[in-house]
Image (cartoon, helix red, strand yellow):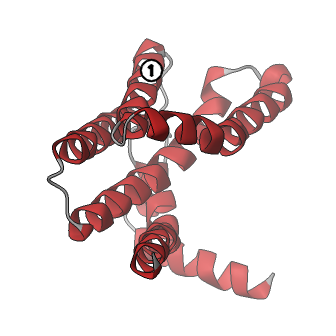
Amino acid sequence: MASCDAHIAVSGNVLAATAFVLRLPAGALVDRWDRRRIMIVCDAGRIVNAAVFGTAVALGQYRFAHVLLVAFVEAALGVLFGPAESAAVRRVVTAEQRREAVAANAGRTQLPGLAGPPLGGVLLSAGRSLPFFADAVSYAVSLACVLSVRTDLRTRRTATAADRPVAEMLYCVRWIGRH
């Protein structure tokens, strides 16, 4: 049991460390790239990530290194998807609807944290791979929703700002340090 607890802790650390390390670079990239395309690629990647791992679990063919890779991919794609989704809200809704849309979006993102653990437990008791397939289905629903958005989600930036992502990240780190 101690080995299992250690594996869970290491997996959680991979998730957290990946998110921590990639957050600033991801934010800079999201500001430069087409947000709709980012969300599509991230959802597609997370579908594959969850489905492949679910299949490996169902077949009993996964190893701890696979778990760590899945955690890394999940965190990396989530770090890109989150800011793209948040920034896209400004393009999808009118200024008058923005406050309500941001609040609804924030509430919606908290729902998996509340419902996920009990639902995951039920799915896990029905089959070890079911939580991963359910995750893949949830990303497929998200992908369908993103594909239905017809609004242009790209940001218009000046060429000088777009050419300096490292300087922008360093500015952000200094800003965080001051505040």
Q: Is residue 104 left or right of residue 169?
A: right
Q: Quadrant of residue 136?
A: top left
Q: Does 139 sit left or right of 41 as displayed?
A: right
Going 47% across and 45% down the picture, which residue do you hit? 81
Residue 103 makes an appearance in the image = yes
Left or right of residue 120: residue 159: left
In the image, 164: left or right of 16? left
Q: Nearer the viewer, residue 115 or 82?
A: 115
| Image quadrant where one finds the N terminus | bottom left
Nearer to us in this view, 75 or 126: 126
166 vs 163, nearest the viewer = 166
Residue under pointer 1:
141
| Residue 159 visible from this viewpoint | no
Q: Amino acid at mark 1?
A: Val
Crowding at dot 1, Cα within 10 Å, few <14 / some 14-19 / many 20+, comes out as: some
Up/down of 154 relative to 158, above or below: above
What residue is shown at x 55% (from left), y 35% (from top)? 122
Q: Is residue 100 above or below residue 73?
A: above
Q: Quadrant of the C terminus?
A: bottom right
Label 1 sits on a secondary structure element that is helix
Res. 113 image quadrant: top right
Residue 158 place in picture, x, y as percent: 47, 52
In this view of the protein, which residue sits in the foreground, 53 or 2?
2
Count the marks: how many? 1
Question: Residue 60, how many percent across, how many down?
Answer: 18, 50
Return the x and y of residue 96 as percentages of the image width and height: 85, 21
Residue ID at (48%, 38%): 125
